[in-house]
Amino acid sequence: SMSDAKKWFDLTADVDTSKSGELIFAGGSAWSLSGRSGETAQFDGQEERNLVSFHRLKPLIGVPVFAVVTGCVANHTFALTEKGIFAWGRNENGELGLGDQVNRYNPTLVTKISNLSDPIVGGACGDKHTLLYSKLGILYTCGDNEFGQLGNGHSGNTTINISPLSIISGVRTAGAGRGFSCVADKAGSCYTFGYPKDGILGHGTEGKFLGTGNKWEYACETRPRKLEALTGVKIAQVSCGARHTIAADEHGRVYTWGFGGYGRLGHGDNKNQFLVKALEFFHNEPEKPPPNANPLFFRPKKPRRLKHVAAGSRCCYGIDEYGRLYFWGITKSSGEATMYPKPYNGLQGWNVRSVASGFSSTIVASDSLITWGPSPTSGELGYGEKGPKSSTIEKIVEDLEDAYVLKVGMGYRHSLAIVELADGGDKLVEKLPVFEPLELKDMPKREASSKKSSKKRKREEDDDEEEEDEDEDEDEEEKEEEDITKLTVKALKQRLKDHGLKISGNKPKLVARLKSHMKKKAKK
């Protein structure tokens, strides 16, 4: 058929690593605090620190970066360069693959996967795990494996050394969300693994069964399982939100599945899709002229296809052949949800090259670097000290006006951009401040923090906690309880104080008081 004439993707071609530039960073950079209510037991001593303007990263100055790997729920990042693979961010589960569980504040060389004869060319970061793949398609994974999201046939064991999988080969695109993973290979076959709740894996079921003590449990997939629903379709690109996945085939037709809240799957409803579902909007066939049409006046409607897809935490973005940006889902909880794909109004007339979205903010590479996102933010919009903290409409990042940005990336609360250094890009980048924080081992031991900062932080972080409000139900309550017992006495007292409760007594008393308060609140 005519619609098969145009192939956007050549699945046999190597991933293009020829274009590179300098990687710059903005946003939250206190890795043990991001997305949490104040200081939990994981607190590593680094106080809240938001870079509100884009910064150069000391170890990456003069190191051309051809790709950046992170994810909308990730607090960690990888920079892929000819000189090796650099990782930084949260590492509590070994997600940096460095062989330990110490957070890193500067890009750190992952020697095990650097200077391989078959180099790493792409990947994805979930909330606590990492997928990277090589030029030949070998998949490497590390980090938390509670649900089998590392695809190594096991679940529950954390992998702190990044390791290749022998189970799958030829990988050329990857996505990762909360506890699940998705990859597609050079033959166009698509595989998912990890946590199946809400149909996130797309196999037609959520694997629910009644476990011990009459509790619902979910049968996780611990190795890559092929999506039979896509037999005959060649998937070229995948991207994962917190709990949903979007994929594009070699012709640019689009498929979504998983958790459906706020219209993020684009099917016009809030239903969870347990099975891969074609997104009709991007499957229209080219119009045939009526038999008596005058060929001079007949303007057929063109098929709508996407060249690039990117999932945000609760939304999807797509870019078509003309550089037009499409959007559906939601970025601001209190805002209107967009239930099916629509051209993104604010950027009409802009030719968009690359897009990424985090918890609620978005970054776009076009003729300038453009960002937007509702409050609260952690500086990831990069507008600088004098600029606004948030913006619900798209705004140019003035420090980088006219910079040619090759690619963008966005983590949970941080932004990344690869800037082309030719044609004056180097001059723009040289004006930016350099970020060179101390590593934990070199940090002075700190005094007790002031009450105000932890109270203020508590308030801001609460907004993040509400993110999946209506759908996290029982799991979230269990998580809440686990977290409360992990809090330090100081943090418990602060939390009780915030709720206007008594702060006398030993730790078990404080925990019990806070738990009963939370229960009452939940009942209300």
Image: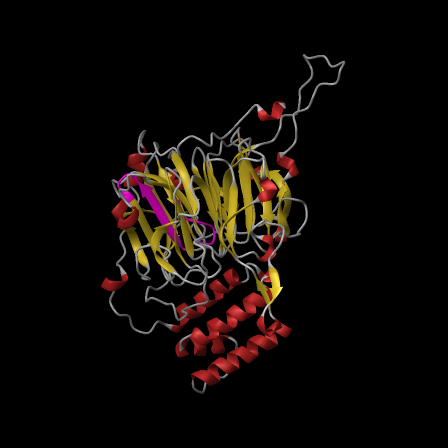
Nearest to the observer: residue 274 or residue 341:
274
Q: Is residue 329 visible?
A: no
Left/right placement of residue 55 relative to residue 513 reads left
- In the image, farthest residue toward the right: 292
* Above or below: residue 459 compared with residue 98: below
Front residue of this view, candidates 519 and 110: 110
Q: Is residue 225 visible?
A: yes
Magenta segment includes 179:
no
Question: How many dots with numbers?
Answer: 0
Which residue occupies 68% across, 45% down? Answer: 268
Which is more toward the observer, 457 or 507? 507
Image vertical order of residue 434 relative to residue 82, above or below: below
Q: Along the horizontal axis of the image, is 416 left or right of 304? A: left
Q: Quadrant of the C terminus?
A: bottom right
Estimate the x, y position of residue 278 in percent, counting from the top left.
63, 40
In which quadrant is the N terminus drawn? Answer: top right
Could you tell me which residue is drawn at 37 percent across and 37 percent down? 136
Q: How is the image coloured?
A: secondary structure
Relative vertical location of residue 257 with respect to residue 206 in this rendering, above or below: above
User: x%, y% of residue 69?
Assistant: 40, 46
Q: What's the magenta region? A: 69-84
- Whether the magenta-drawn stretch holds residue 82 is answered as yes
Could you say where residue 37 lies in the image, as x and y percent from the top left? 46, 67
Q: Residue 420: horizontal and vertical position, in percent?
A: 34, 34
Q: Along the line of sight, which residue is nearer the eye, 352 or 119?
A: 119
